[in-house]
Structure formats: structure tokens, C-alpha cells
Image (tube, rainbow, N blue to C red):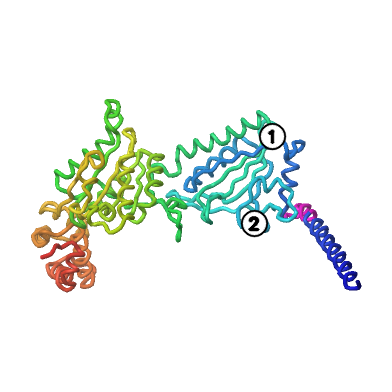
Amino acid sequence: MAYLGWLFVGLLLGFGLAFFFRTKSFASVNSFADDGQDGSPQLVAPLLKSHFKPTTASEITITERRFPFRMRADLQRTIDKVFGDEITIKHFFGVRSEYSHCAPTLTDCILESVNNPTYSIPPEYEELDLGDEHPLRVLKNGLWLLEVDGVSFAVMLSPCGQYGQVTGMQFQIGVPLSSEGSQIAQRFFKQLEDAVARGESYRGKILSLEQAEHSYSGESNGITVHKLREVRREDVILPADTLILLERNVVHFARNRNRLSRLGMSKKKGILFYGPPGTGKTHTIHHLAGSLDGHTTILISAEQVGLLGEYMTLARLLQPSMVVMEDVDLIARERTSMESVCEEVLLNKLLNEMDGLKEDAEIFFILTTNRSEALEAALASRPGRVDQAIEFPLPDAEGRRKLVALYAPKAMLDEGLIDEIVHRTDGVSAAFIKEFMRRATQFSVERDENSRLTDADMDLALDEMLFKGGSLNRKILGAGQD
């Protein structure tokens, strides 16, 4: 009996201590909520209660909308404009839960939780490079207490996703349960949707998708803006017939696209660039990216073909656009040479995306390959996917002369020496001539910084490029097999 008596006393003591610490914890939380006078964090629930007063929590309705993570730049610019011009900001702060690994929701903020309350914290931003003079600051998490036309409401921005990966940005808006509140929510989300549809932050730029390291979902976590070198029309050294074919099928087609559409013609077009390595395919793409006014250029590497669906969504959103996939033979080679089902799935994904482009899609699909003979017939031999193949041959004598003039240092090369270089570089690629001129210039500078290029410089450069590196070096530099 004595044992049972002591057990009963222990239980009473335990309950008493638990009640004491719980009461003290609750009191400390309430005192924490009142500490806002000195700039320390406050509980969010009392702030929301005071903001919506006399509307109670049961009279508030919350609506949610999610947007792709890659569009956060346009979302940020929209809320900066809307909240700055049309809506009064009563209070703004970041939000954090004490024990939660996920970002809290607006519902979490409204609830006066004792065990896991939400606190106001300084807002956190991230800088995005949009290819402009200055990066754009985008908010990672925040809560606005707002008012418009005498109606109080709240908007919360937080990241969202699945399996630990952030794939989107979530907006939640809390408004009074009334027709006025519903109109505020609808108008706010319509402004966000219009901003995403316009895509002004990325339209007309050169883009690729970022993919999170160790991501198993295949979803992207943002957009990279590229700055390609400027390539002028006169710097594209190709045979005259090739240039005419290129301009008719790309530049002139884009210029007359709307007129052709009114006559019932399709706006989309597939182009295949093929030829030996180093003949100017990538160089020409850089030129087109700067020449197609108003077009967004989207660069897809072969290893990112798993993101092809997202890339095409971006291409449709930001059209008119030019989608570029270099070395397409890596995923679009003949099915008979494939070694796994996964390779065939990637090929089918590419074919389906090209087939799925509607006739009114203002999209160029430009593919490049160094091995046209290895391409799958369903891509290379079927009209409707590739509308024009354009060959990039090794440069002829006239082309080599222009390439030497393009890449040689100005005022360091005599006309007679140009003739000699053109004669000695028969059968090499444009990339070889570019490296040849750099190598010869290096020998000249090492000999005498102010001297002109000589035959000896050419001999040393050719010897190093063609013989000292062996046959593999010749192949790498685009000098052919012999």
C-alpha cells in the first residue's frame, strides 16, 4: 500500500510540474508577442487578428494559387507594382515557424498555436540575374497586411514543392467572407496570371533551365540568362548558296510569318544544321540569336532532354522563340543502334514535342549534328518535323580568305601571306583557321611584340598543330584525316 501511495504522489507531482511549465511557456509566448516595441519578433496570429478586426478568423476565407518557380521574377515585379500603386501596405514582414521544416501557410499564421507558433522575422531576398544591368531582388517568403477601398486582407508568399525540392511559389490570400473579398482575390490572381503570360522578365533573351543537383523529379529550379557573343552578318563565313538558304528559311521566314499565316501557312519551322565539326554551326546560331528581333532563344543541351516538356512550355509562353538543340544525334540516332529502352523514350519525347507544336506556334526548332548519317529516319526523313536541312561544308578558298581576314590581327598580315595561308589550309575547318591565326600570332609576339606575321610563324604554327600533336590533334582541330 505504501508503494501505491508514493506512486500516487509522484503522479500528482508530475501533473503539477507539467501544468506549471506549460503555463509559464504560454506566458512567455504572450510576452514575446508584446515585445514588438523594441523591434524583436512578434507572434503573427495577434497581428492578423488586429489587422482583420472586427472580422473574426471564422469569417476569413483563404484562396491559394501556385506558379512555376522559374516565373518568380515576373511575380516579384507584379507584386511590387500592385502593392505600391493600387493597394495600401499596412505591415510587411517575413514569417517563420519555430519547429517546422516547411514554410508556414496563412492558416498556420492565423491559428494561435502554443506548441508551434509563427513569428514575424525580417524578410529574406535572393538576387536573380536577368541579363540586365542590375540583378532583381526576389522575395523568398513574406506576409503583407493590406487594405483597399476600406477592406482589410492579407497576402502570403512562400515556396512550395515536393520531396524536399522547391518547384514553385505559392500565393495565399485571406479576405473577408464577402463579395468584396472575393473580388479582391480574383483581381489579385488575375494580375499575377497576366504577368506570367506576358513573361516580360525573360522575353527576347537567351535562356536555359537550371536543374537542381541530385534532383530525381526532373523538374527545373530556375532559369539561366546567357550572354552570347555578338556575331554580325559579315562575320558568318559560309558559301553564298548556304547563306541564301539560311536567310530565306530563318530570317526572311520570321519577317513574313504573319503574312504567311493570314494565307493559311504554318508559323512553325524545323531546321537541321549538319556538317563536319568546326564549320560554323554554333557560330551561326549566335548570329541568329542576335538577328531575330523579338525572339526568345532557348538552349537545350543533350543531357537536359528530360526537361524537354518544360522547355517547350517555356518556348510556347515566350514565343516567338527559337529552340536550339545541339548535337541532336546523341539522343536521336537510329533506333537500331540504341542499347536501352530509356534512350528510345528520350527520342520519342523529342519527336512528340516537335509533332505537338501547333501550326500557329511561332517557334523555330533548330537542331545541329556532326553525324547526319546516324540520325533516326523518323526525325531526318519525315516532313513536318524538319522542314529544311542546311549543310555547313568545309570552307572553300574564298571562305578561307574571309576567315583569315576575320581572325588575323589587323595590320599584321600582308596580302601575299594571305594567299599562302589560303593555299596551305585547303580542307580544314573554320575552327582550324581561327586557332591557326591565334597560334601564329603567339609565335610572332614571342619573337617580337611589334613585328608582322611571317612565313616562319606560319610554319611553326602548322608544325605544332598538324604534326607534333599527332593524328588525334589534327582531328580535334578540324584538319581532317590527312
Splitting the image into 4 quarters, where does residue 217 fall? bottom left
* Gap between marks 2 and 1 measured at Cα: 28 Å
Depth check: give the residue in front, 340 or 456. 340
Q: Is residue 121 above or below residue 468?
A: above
Q: Read off the residue under disc 1.
A: 176
Q: Read off the residue under disc 2.
A: 100
- Residue for point 19% across, 68% down: 473
Could you classify mark 1 by the number of other residues whose Cα lies within 10 Å: few (under 14), some (14-19), or many (20 or more)?
Answer: many
Q: Can you tell which mark lies on residue 478?
A: none
Amino acid on which the number 1 mark rests in the picture: Pro
Element at badge 1? strand
Tell me, yes or no, whether the highlighted magenta stretch contains residue 90: no
Q: Is residue 112 above or below residue 99?
A: above
Q: Is residue 282 visible?
A: no
- Residue for point 33% across, 51% down: 345
Q: Residue furthest front?
A: 1
Q: Is residue 40 left or right of residue 8?
A: left
Splitting the image into 4 quarters, where does residue 21 fall? bottom right
Give the magenta-colored segment's residue range: 30-39
Depth check: give the residue in front, 441 or 197. 197
Amino acid on which the number 2 mark rests in the picture: Ser
Quadrant location of the N terminus?
bottom right
